[in-house]
Amino acid sequence: MIFLIVSVLVFGAVVATVVAMTAQAEERGTDSLRDRVGAKLSRLRIPTPLEIMRDTRMSAFPLLDRMLQSISASRKLEMMLYQAGASMRVGMFLLVVAAVAMVAYLIGYIVFGNLISAFACMAAGGLVLPLYMLHKRSVRMNAFAEEFPDALDLLVSALRAGISFSSALQIVADESPEPIRSEFAVVVEEQSLGIEMREALANLAKRVDTVDIKFFVTAIVLQRDTGGNLTEVLENTSRLIRDRFRILGDIKTFTAQGRLTGFILTCLPMAMAAFMIVSAPEYFLKMWERPEGRMILGVAALMQLMGGLAIRKIVDIKV
């Protein structure tokens, strides 16, 4: 009976995912048509009032969108998807996670034949896509942080050539690699739509989760409030960011032994357990068959996790 219910839920999740993907494709087609129509109207020079509207929907389904809008955690999930460079909405993301979790449940039930293993597979399957998005987010933010000092040097060079700050931001958006190109392009676009520079930079600091961009935005805002040489301010900010990267490199060098020790201590017990299962399964499975053995394995796994987290906390030095 449980297997039948879960099968129906899997079918419903897959159907909802397909419908959401179809609706998203239709939205892209509608947006493309709207852009073309807007381009035609702009050529006709029809006077229209300036109105900035943002598409804040979290799902193509109105009911699911209203449910997600009422949950505060949905905004954090939406920001995580944006920072990862994903184009899907929150509702689509949750539907895909549910579908993958249900498929993993079915596979676990078919392979192992018991509900405990099936639910364990469902939990593991449900974590695949969120962990992948967190990895993409980390890679994208690290790429932004690595390229940001070069973007600041380009901005300083443009300012020294006598170009205005807004035009210098446009040059950075045109010449810099991703993801700096897209983020600064959003700043330039927001400014062209009538948003103040202070608000556009504040939005940039919200979208990019790095300390360096907060240094940059704070320096620009203070310079616009108190005055001073903007080129010198940006040069000092670039120098500060490069010194911070140099210190981080030194810290990684000094903590390499600790990180390697943590990796070995974390992987060695699992590797030994896998080796024993392959080489002498009758020796290891006796511990798994008895309740006391399973309890000991669970306590050992928990202590292993706590030890790994403790070592990571020790070697994770903030600068």
Image (cartoon, helix red, strand yellow):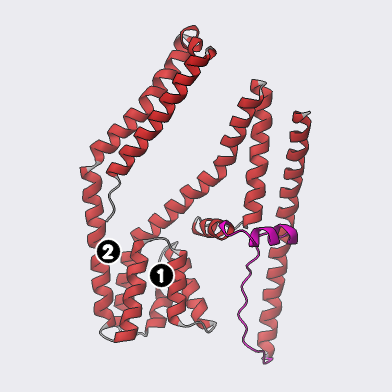
The residue stretch that appears in magenta = 46-73
The type of residue carrying mark 1 is Glu
Quick check: 88 left or right of 316?
right
- Residue 241, which numbered label? 2
Measuring from the top left, give residue 232's x and y in whole percent: 24, 78
The type of residue carrying mark 2 is Ile
Q: Quadrant of the image for the C terminus?
A: bottom left
Measure the alpha-carbon separation of dots 1 and 2. 20 Å
Q: Residues within 10 Å of mark 2 (few under 14, many from 20)?
A: many
Residue at 33% x, 64% y: name it: 212
Which residue position holds label 1? 175
The relative height of residue 283 versus residue 181 in the rendered view (above or below) is above
Asked if residue 305 can be seen in this view, the reply is yes
Residue at 56% x, 61% y: name it: 75
Q: Quadrant of the image for the N terminus?
A: top right
Which image quadrant for residue 173?
A: bottom left
The relative height of residue 299 versus residue 9 in the rendered view (above or below) is above
Q: In this view of the protein, which residue sits in the foreground, 268 or 3?
A: 3
